[in-house]
Amino acid sequence: MVTLVIRRIAVALVLVFGLATLVFFLSRLLPGDPALLFIAPSVPASVADRLRNDFGLSGSFTHQYISWIAGILHGQIGYSFSLHREVLGIIGNTLPYTLLLAGSAIALEFVLAIGVVYCLSLKNSPSRNRFFSVASISMYTIPSFWIAYLLLQTFTVSSHIFPSSHYHSVGIDTASWLSRNADFLLHLILPVCTLALPGAAGLSRFLKASVDQVAGMEYVLFARSQGQSTTRIFFRTILPNAIAPLLTLGGLELGTLLAGALITEQIFSLPGMGRLTIAALFARDYPLILGCTMTAGIAVIASNMLADILHATLDPRIRGVRRA
Amino acid sequence: MSLYRYLVILCAVCTIVNGCDRQDAAKPSQPVVIALSNDVDTFNPLFASDATTGELNDLIFPSLVTPSFDTASGELHFSPSLAKSFEFSNDLKDITFHLHSNVFWSDSVPITAYDVQTTFSLYADPQVGSVRQSAADGMIKKSDGSVDIAKSVEVIDDTTVVFHFRQTYPGQLFDAGLPLLPAHIFDKISRKDLRTHESNRKPVGAGPYRLRSWTPMQEIVLEPNPLSPIVTTAKSPVLVFRIVPEYRSQLNQLKSGEIDMLLSLEAADAAAVTGGSQQISLVRIPARRYHFIGWNNIDQQSYAASGGKVILPHPLFGDARVRRALTLAIDRLKLLEALLNNYGVLAVGPIAPFFHWAYNDSLQPYAYDPQEARLQLQQLGWKPVGREKVLQKDGREFSFALCVPTGSPFWSSVATIVQEQLRAVNVKATIEHVERAVYWQSLQEKKYDAWIAGFEVPLQMQQQEFWSSDLAKNPFNISSYRNARVDQLLTAAQFSTDPRDAGKMWKELQSILHRDQPFTFLFWEDRIVAMNSHLRGTAINVLGTFQSAPQWSH
């Protein structure tokens, strides 16, 4: 297992480095001069030149690239042109929000998918299965912005049950610990549902197929013959064997969410990596673009690696194959 | 317990928690919540480039004088603010400001005349690169062309400062009224580090408000500044600016009562928003923004190839008669009705109608007349050719790219309608969407044939940079318009301190631009501010939204 993790980390480092190099040169090819975005047109050209120099944009691309790599080796990703702060600090402030949103959404996706498939396994009815098939594919194909607006219309505009944006209410900072946390959870519900519903629909389809396959195995029949309850058989015998392939899917999904759920962040006015990346692109803020891209790359690679490790932990055959 | 019961209990808890919030919302001490589309760039007026950032900075930083707008004449007037009084010299070239004594910055350090001098040395310093550097253009200069700050802003004593200008001009008080910065902080910062310094996030001001918190991409909270020498803030509300990037989300939050104010309501929503259960009122602010179709007056290829030395007329739009014919072909009244629900007026030039002293109300907008447009183009030698009947002259087809920035559905709609209307007079326009940053840079580099854009006009009359023939010095003359008489008028009007004389010049300038149509001026767009009706004291006008904020109440 340790060898597997070390090998994966080594590959991940090479991938992130390659990705960063690619993005570095691609971002430099974007049309538009970052220096001109931050000064008035009437300001003398010498000021723009000085600003370019301060931004590290003087010299050839190769020279800029070498300086940038040297900076990274010294632990400095760069300084944001548009937000006037260290990129590392900006990402450090933003990433926890994304981790929270993505983590909650993935957790809800698994809970919903397992719950739905469990309900279906209680009674094997063709009509139920048909309904599930249609409903899940419909939910999976609805765009997330549409789900967001449906939820907002229903639970905010019409009924005022949930707040529609941000992570906290105005003036809640002076309230009690309990109120602050209840308020925070209320704010989390709609964006997490927006992210999780389509993903849960997709996961449940995969899980259903996997559960149906496992349900026909002899060890499940043996468990039934022992008179174990349906619930016990589902959670103790079927699910551990059926869920392993879903971890890979979950890993991919988590990686995508960590790179930024732009539409959800935008609609619910939440800070996050998606909004940060788009703002950086529009501002031609090269250091921030690179920082966001590297974070997204690391997130995708790390979540896939996590899924592989979990898979290997749950399925001894994987470890066996690696050793062989 | 069944799942259904759990859901009912969850909904009940949510309703109770939210209900508590709503009861609080009725309390008079409740903060005023305002939605902003974008986060603020900086809390430093040296670098505050967009209008909202500028307005928030104005709440935090004090000024010597405060402007007011006379709606009858359309003139700006100034009254003392941090200065308790001011007077002009006999030749009007000098202004002496007498500051209040015993006034303090929000960190309790006294404000003195030296703060004023330091501030203007920062505005004037090219190394700082302030967006307001042009405010120092009228000051006394050294032989090398740099501003002589000791001679321009003379400190007499702690409470007296004199501004000396090279010559008189109407904007002297406007320029002297820029936000002030604390010298005891900015003296310690290297000028090249100012743009990125920590102080830009933790401002020390003396305006009616001070920064309580700033959570990037989330919210900005301003609280009344008890040390402010400018206004009494004992009853002023806390202002919470929430960053809500999506317009539809802003609208939903206004309807649900989560925000109190939406700064720019789309005209299409004006009727619907006032019909809901939430009591919402609208304030219509006279237009400061006009939209236009820009025509490049010069041949951009020869201009670029010669490094700006060769200036030839544009093969399509170089002739003012062609540009006038194109204006006749565009039904601007229909555009105004369809896209702005008549929240605006047709434009005849670049001077806003509320500047009554300078606006030429004798000019009538060109009427929509496609027949006349066709006739005029034919008289100029443009004849329909081929199956598509696109106009041609000397083998050149009348076809061009009409550029629009991405992420602007309003201008995209204008482009689509204009494209159809031009097709009716056999002119072929192809719509090209260009990424926003590239679009504005390319406009300044004069790369496009035609484009759709808009300008927000400043309150201090300023047209030099848009119409002066010196193209290299004025990148905002994006249509590359050149006219010797306009240059004379611009120079004379900008130094005329008599509004009646200046008014005549501005009116003549509008007549010339109306005749020459360097742009097809479309319309002025009114701004609609939507707010909950329980807000009181919101005297919002063309000067800005938040000037009266200290007097707001629920």
Image: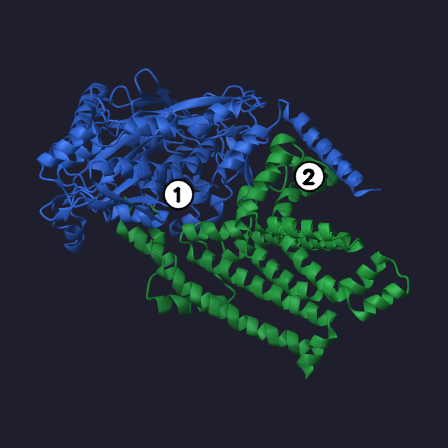
Chain colours: A green, B blue
The answer to whether residue A82 of the structure is visible from this angle is: yes
Q: In x, y percent, where is residue A309?
A: 67, 70
User: Mark 1 and mark 2: span between their CA atoms?
Assistant: 36 Å
- Residue A231 lies left or right of residue A283; in this view the side is right
In the depicted view, which residue is nearer to us: A16 or A42? Answer: A16
Residue drawn at the location 63% of the way across and 55% of the way down: A202
Whether discs 1 and 2 lie on one chain: the answer is no
Identify residue for label 1: B47
* Residue B335, quarter of the rendered image: top left
Q: Residues within 10 Å of mark 2 (few under 14, many from 20)?
A: many
Image vertical order of residue B174 relative to residue B73, above or below: below
Task: Name the residue at the right extreme.
Answer: A227
Task: Name the residue at the bottom extreme.
Answer: A324
Image vertical order of residue A246 relative to residue A318, above or below: above
Identify residue for label 2: A183
Give the total number of marks visible in the rendering.
2
Task: Name the residue at the top extreme.
Answer: B72
Of all chains, the one bearing label 2 is A
In the depicted view, which residue is nearer to us: B393 or B489? Answer: B393
Residue drawn at the location 9% of the way across and 39% of the way down: B381
In front: mark 1 or mark 2?
A: 2
Q: Quadrant of the N terminus of chain B?
A: top right
Image vertical order of residue B499 relative to residue B246, above or below: above
Q: Residues within 10 Å of mark 1 (few under 14, many from 20)?
A: many
Amino acid at pointer 1? Phe
**CB atoms of marks 1 and 2 within 8 Å:** no
Q: In x, y percent, where is residue B286?
A: 36, 23
Of all chains, the one bearing label 1 is B
